[in-house]
Image: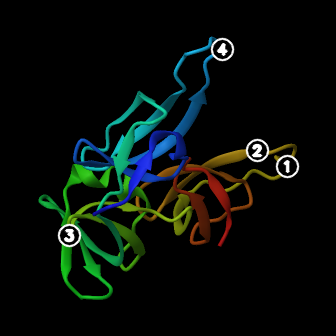
């Protein structure tokens, strides 16, 4: 029997199962009552790992959730086509596929051979977790104008995946840069 998690113990970045669906907690806020006899409530901002939908829901502190049958496997990105994206499980060497809906905007950060964490719920792939930062090559950027060095001046840079981000003036075509996957911002040279 899977362990039960009380709503009041759910914290940010935790996984739990609610109504037979796995969820990821993005934010947790506990509100204690000021009046006697009031109930402590927990507001959770949560992401449905099957549909990728995000919503807020309020639970009583004593509500219980099951621990999801969620497995994280290391996989390398192979390719994408009209039917979805394909990954190679690094342990079993089995090819796993994810639909476009399960991928979200992850393709903006994936190059062939990239190693990521794949989520499996009850043995079936349901989504992926990108690392905090990825390294990608700059395929196009305009040359920085000489003298434009005051403050934090940026220019547009196109990455090998097609994603466009703002980069500092000193970054040139062909250089590898680190990009935050959550905010799509420049994190430094690779």
For the residues labelled 4 and 2, the Cα–Cα distance comes to: 50 Å
Q: Quadrant of residue 68?
A: bottom left
Q: Residue 164, relative to residue 30: is it above or below? A: below
For the residues labelled 1 and 2, the Cα–Cα distance comes to: 7 Å
Q: Residues within 10 Å of mark 1 (few under 14, many from 20)?
A: few
Q: Please count the marks in the image.
A: 4
Q: For mark 2, what is the residue?
A: 153
Q: Quadrant of residue 69?
A: bottom left
Q: In the depicted view, which residue is nearer to us: 154 or 18?
A: 18
Query: As drawn, is 144 to the left or to the right of 75?
Result: right
Q: Residues within 10 Å of mark 3 (few under 14, many from 20)?
A: few
Are circles 1 and 4 on residues that touch, CB within 8 Å?
no
Are circles 3 and 2 on residues that touch, CB within 8 Å?
no
Query: As drawn, is 78 to the left or to the right of 40?
Result: left
Q: Residue 116, relative to residue 14: is it above or below? A: below
Q: Counting residues from the N terminus, which is met first, the one under dot 1 or under dot 3?
A: 3
Q: For mark 4, what is the residue?
A: 34
Q: Secondary structure at mark 4?
A: loop
> In the current view of this chain or complex, which residue is farthest to the top?
35
Q: Nearer the viewer, mark 4 or mark 2?
A: 4
Q: In the depicted view, which residue is nearer to us: 20 or 108?
A: 20
Image coordinates of residue 36 in percent, x first then y, are 61, 14
Query: As drawn, is 126 to the left or to the right of 187?
Result: left
Image coordinates of residue 120 in percent, x first then y, are 27, 66
Q: Secondary structure at mark 2?
A: loop
Q: For mark 3, what is the residue?
A: 123
Q: Counting residues from the N terminus, which is met first, the one under dot 3 or under dot 2?
A: 3
Q: Nearer the viewer, mark 1 or mark 3?
A: 3
Q: For mark 1, what is the residue?
A: 149
Are circles 1 and 2 on residues that touch, CB within 8 Å?
yes
């Amino acid at each position: 029997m899977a362990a039960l998690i009380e709503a009041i113990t759910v914290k940010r970045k935790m996984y739990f199962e609610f109504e037979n669906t796995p969820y990821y907690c993005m934010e947790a806020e506990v509100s204690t009552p000021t009046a006697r006899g009031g109930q402590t409530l927990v507001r959770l901002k949560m992401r449905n790992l099957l549909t990728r939908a995000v919503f807020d829901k309020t639970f009583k502190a004593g509500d219980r959730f099951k621990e999801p049958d969620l497995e994280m496997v290391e996989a390398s990105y192979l390719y994408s086509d009209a039917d979805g994206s394909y990954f190679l499980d690094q342990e079993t060497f089995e090819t796993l596929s994810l639909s476009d809906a399960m991928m979200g905007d992850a393709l903006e950060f994936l190059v062939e051979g990239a190693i990521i964490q794949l989520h499996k719920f009850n043995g079936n792939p349901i989504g992926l977790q990108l690392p905090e930062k990825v390294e990608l090559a700059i395929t196009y950027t305009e040359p920085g104008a000489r003298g434009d060095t005051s403050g934090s001046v940026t220019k547009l840079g196109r990455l090998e995946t097609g994603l466009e981000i703002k980069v500092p003036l000193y970054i040139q075509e062909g250089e590898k840069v680190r990009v935050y996957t959550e905010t799509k911002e420049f994190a430094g040279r690779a």
